[in-house]
Structures are given as C-alpha cells and as structure tokens.
Amino acid sequence: MNLRKFAPVAAFVAFMAAFPWMVAPFDAISHYTDVMVFAGIFCLVTIGLSLLMGFAGQISLAQAAFFGIGAYASAILTGRFGWNPWAAMPAGAAAAAAVAWIVGVPALRLKGHYLAMATLGFGVIVHIVLNEEVEWTGGPSGMVDIPGLSVAGVRVLSETAWYYLVWTFVAAALIFSYHVLHSRVGRALRAIHEAEKAAEAMGVPVASYKVQVFVYSAVLASLAGSLYTHYVTFLTPSSFDLMWSVRFVLMVVVGGMQSLWGAVLGTVFLTFVGNEWLHVFADFEVLVYGGILLAVALLVPQGLVVWMQEKLSRRRETLLPRSE
Amino acid sequence: MESAGFGAAWLQYALGGITIGAIYALVAIGYNIIYNVTEIINFAQGEFVMLGGLFAVFFYEACGLPILAAFLAAVAAVALTGLVLERYVIRNARQATVLSMIIITIAFSILLKGGAMLAWGKDPYRLPPFTGGGSILWNGVAVQPQALWVLGVSGIIVVCLTLFFRRSVYGKAMLACADNPAAARLVGIPVRTMIFLSFMLSAAIGAAAGVSITPITLMEYDRGALLGLKGFGAAVLGGLGQFFGALVAGLLLGLAESFCAGYVSSGYKDAVALVLLLLALFFKPEGLFGSKEAAGLKRF
C-alpha cells in the first residue's frame, strides 16, 4: 500500500476515532454520536449491498428483511430464551444466511427487473410474517425490554462506547470486503458485472459467486440488525419494511455503487439527512428523499463519491500532465 | 341449511376475489403496455392506481363533479402524470441500464407517494359507488353494484386494448417499437411518440383501476406499492406482455387471495399473491401462457 492510498485511510480512521470527542463539547451537535451509531449500523448493511450491486451487478430490495431477521432473531433468543447476545448474533446471521441461500439460488438466476421484483416480493413477505406472528414477534406493536450488550463483562451503555463498538464492526466489514474485492472472487465479480456470458465462458462459476455475495450481504445485514436491536432495545416491524430496503439501495446509489467508500459516505450522509436535517421538513421527508434519489440517478448515476473522484483525478491530470 | 350457508360463503369469497382480481389484471396490463414498447418495468405503476383513486376523490368532493366526470378527470390527471414521468424523467436518464431504470422509476414512485401524502394526508378516503342502489341478492350472495362496474370496466379495457394492438396501425406500431426500435424508426414509426403514448396509456389504465376500486376498498396514499407488486405478480404469471394472460392470472391471484382470507388467515392474504409471484419467477418466469422461446428473447 503506497502513501497516496494510505494517507486518506489514515485520515479517515483518525477522524472517526476522534469524532465523539470533537462533537461532545458542543450541545447542539453532541448527539451526533448517537446518529453516527445508527449510521454505522446501516453501513454494515450497505457495504454488503454495495458488493452485490456495484461489483456483482445484482440488485436486492430485500436487505431490510435480512436486517429484520437478524434483529428479531437476537431479540427473541436473548429476550425469550435468555441466550447470551454474542451467541444470538451468529445464530441470527446463520438463519439469515440460510434464508438468503434458499431465496438466492432461484432468485439470482433472474436478471434486472425480475430480480428486483423477486427480492421486493420476498422482503414484503418477511414484513408480513413479522406483523402476523404475534406470538413470537409481538406483531405490529413489536417487542420491548430487549437486553443490552456487554463486552468482557462490562455493559455497553454510553453512546460513545456504542459508537466505538459499531464502527469496529464496520472497519472489520470494510477490511474483509476490501480483501474479497481484491481477490480472485472480486475480479470474478467484476467480470460478471462487465460481461456475464464472457465470464461464464472463461470458467467463472457465475451462479455460485452471485449467491455467495448475496449470502454475504445478508449476513452483514443480519449482524447490523442484531446490533440495532441491542442498541435501541425495542423493535417494531415498521423498521424493516419496504421503504427501508429502498433506503439502503438509495444509500449505496447516492454514495456510488462501485466504491466501498461510496457506500459508507452515502450511508452517513443519508442517515444525517433522515435523522437530523429533514426533521425540519417533517412530512416533506419522503418527498425530499425521492427527489435526492431521482436527481442522483438522473444526473450523477455513478454516485457522488465516484463522481468527485473522477473530477479530482481529471484536475490532477490537467495540472500534472503524465510524463511518459 | 348448513351446506347452503357454506355454499353462499364460498360464492361470496369467489365474487370478492374476482373483483379484486380484475383490478390486479388492470395493473398487470399497465406493466405490459410499457414493457411491450420499451422493455422497462415501471415500478411506479402501483402509484398510478393510488393516484387515480385519490384524484377521483378530489374531483368528486372538492370540485363537485358528478362521479363519472370525476372518473374521467382522474384518469386524465394520472395520464398527465405518466406523461411527466416519460417526458421529464425517463427521457433524461443518462444511463439507460436496467439497474438505473429500476432506481429511477422507484424514485419517481417515492415522489408520487410523498406528494400524495402531503396533498391528501394519511387517512383513507371514501368514494360513492358509480351507481346507487343497495346490494343485489343472488343465490344467497350479496352483489355490490360497484363490483359489476369493476368487472365491466376491466372487460371493456381488455377488449379495447386487444383490438388496439392487433388491428390498429398505432397499436401495431407500438409493438414494432418493442421488437426492434431501430427497424421501427427505419420504416417511419416515431418511436419517441410511441414510448410517450405507452406511458400515458398505462397510467390512464392504472388510474381507471384505482377509481373503480376506491368505492369498495377505500384508498390511501401508501396503497400503491402492494397493488403494484400484486399486479406485477399477475403480469408475470400471465406471461409478461400478454393481455389475455394478465387477465386470467389477475383473476386467479384475486381468487387465491380471497379464499385465503376467508378460510385460512386474513392476515396472510397479502402474502398469497407474493408467494405465487415468487413461485412463478423461480419456476416459470415465462408465465402460464408464455412460450419458452419467446421468453428466451426477452431481457429478464
């Protein structure tokens, strides 16, 4: 890793580590740590989705369903059966992986519109189940008093502690995903995105790779759901409906599909837009959301981060013509 | 006595299923028209249905139009929305990849839903039936006159569209655009105009479905997504692009849903159509009436 690549990463890590201490002294923005906890949780979902959309070229409108499977698995296993949250989390992830595999094998044979509709339909079915299985999920009124998390015997209570915990997960997911993308699998995924038939002819097991990425994205979404459950300690099905699946897609698209950084920055940006800045607009929120999505899809389809990278590298090239 | 009661319940569910099924068929036909001309699946199709119902309420209640005039005005207003979608959104898309088209139509549907929420609020709205008079009792089954209107409107639309696409020059020109836009342009078909017409026609049909069903089920701002998804189920089940198939599949979905609500669980009735949609997509994506070869040519 050369310096030019390393410097922005180091700056990012330093900024993220200092963030709670930077906002804490200012009353008006001290709750930004709390917003960033949610942003981190959503980042886990969108990192997986970005791999699926930007690199494998497949869309999923079911991520809120996997998010919900993780959240409810954690809530039920810890609340009802007294499991340790750290045991419930992988159990939820395993359940999400199994469901993703069962749905993914037939669904990922479909392309484009059909895949979008299939995942959409699946997501709505999961939402209906969460609403209807009142005995297990509490139905539309949801679940309360879900236990919190402890690390090494110490309860994770303060927002700052949660912030570091969640963003450690995000960092791990980023590092793992980065290595996946720069491995044989990552190259194969990009080949699938560019020209699926050609990739298949070259011997890439297209179907199996697509399903693997889908399962990976479901596992990340499920882990995010588990963290979400233990952070907010109550659940209602409305946090896992269709609109949330659309929001996750939106976060990836706004940031830029073909970049993990795009997913992270898009997610942080839109979490602040949704949780903080749009409260001024109240009922206009949905409208502004739709407007942002439409504007980005029409004007900068590659996403804001990739668009800025392109602008910057073009400027650099004009300033410093490459000497051959 | 008991068997008679059972029979009546059965018939009653069937009637309800056919009524709502006719609506799904109309939504499916809306997808088919746009798909036939552009090979785009319009994710905002369900919102056209919702807007149709709410616009009719607006024209009837706020403008005081008679109900049939309100029906026509609502259809025209939603057709105009379809025009806006095509002219100002779809046509300006810089990347016409499938993924970006999906995102663009989803974004437009969010805008329509958000706009409807602002304009009409979150309450469901009522509309009187097109013609007065109470339910007709027939074989122990109460038949709402509005149910007959729904069936009539759907039947007329299906017949007219079939004739339009089979017999008229415009209909054939629209189909030619779907088969091969470049060739269609070469023989002098204005492809742009045809695409534009397909969006208006599809929006108008969605609106007609929305107005017809509002007196029976009421209408509110967030009904679009589910109606759209079920309608898409009917479109896939019937074979994408086929009008007759959409009609049959829509009725089947409606019946399945109504019987599930009656005999199994009313909470899961919405899931029935979605499970059937997934099964159709997974095992028979060419639909019940589509041929495998034709399906191979389409871009699924």
Image (tube, rainbow, N blue to C red):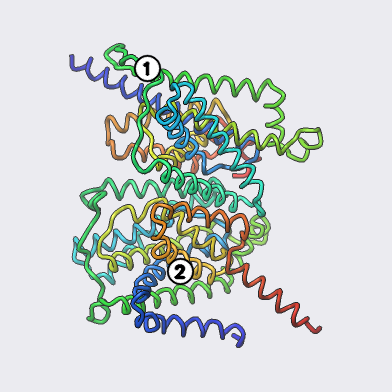
Q: Quadrant of the N terminus of chain A?
A: bottom right
Residue shown at 43%/42% (left/top)?
A: B119
Corner quadrant of residue B201: top right
Relative image position of residue A173 (x, y in whole percent)? 45, 73
Q: Nearer the viewer, residue A300 or A58?
A: A300
Residue assigned mark 1: B145
Corner quadrant of residue A193: bottom right
Helix, strand or loop under label 1 = helix
Q: Residues within 10 Å of mark 1 (few under 14, many from 20)?
A: some
Q: Are marks 1 and 2 on the same chain?
A: no
Q: Is B9 left, or right, of B20 in this rendering?
A: left
Residue shown at 44%/37% (left/top)?
A: B50
Q: Residues within 10 Å of mark 2 (few under 14, many from 20)?
A: many
Residue shown at 41%/20% (left/top)?
A: B130
Q: Amino acid at mark 2?
A: Val
Q: Is B120 left, or right, of B92 in this rendering?
A: left
Q: Amino acid at mark 1?
A: Pro
Q: Is A145 left, or right, of B269 in this rendering?
A: left
Residue A246: in sight, yes or no?
yes
Relative image position of residue A67 (x, y in whole percent)? 37, 60
Number of numbered discs? 2
* Disc 1 + disc 2, Cβ < 8 Å: no
Q: Quadrant of the C terminus of chain A?
A: bottom right
Q: Return the mark for residue A268.
A: 2
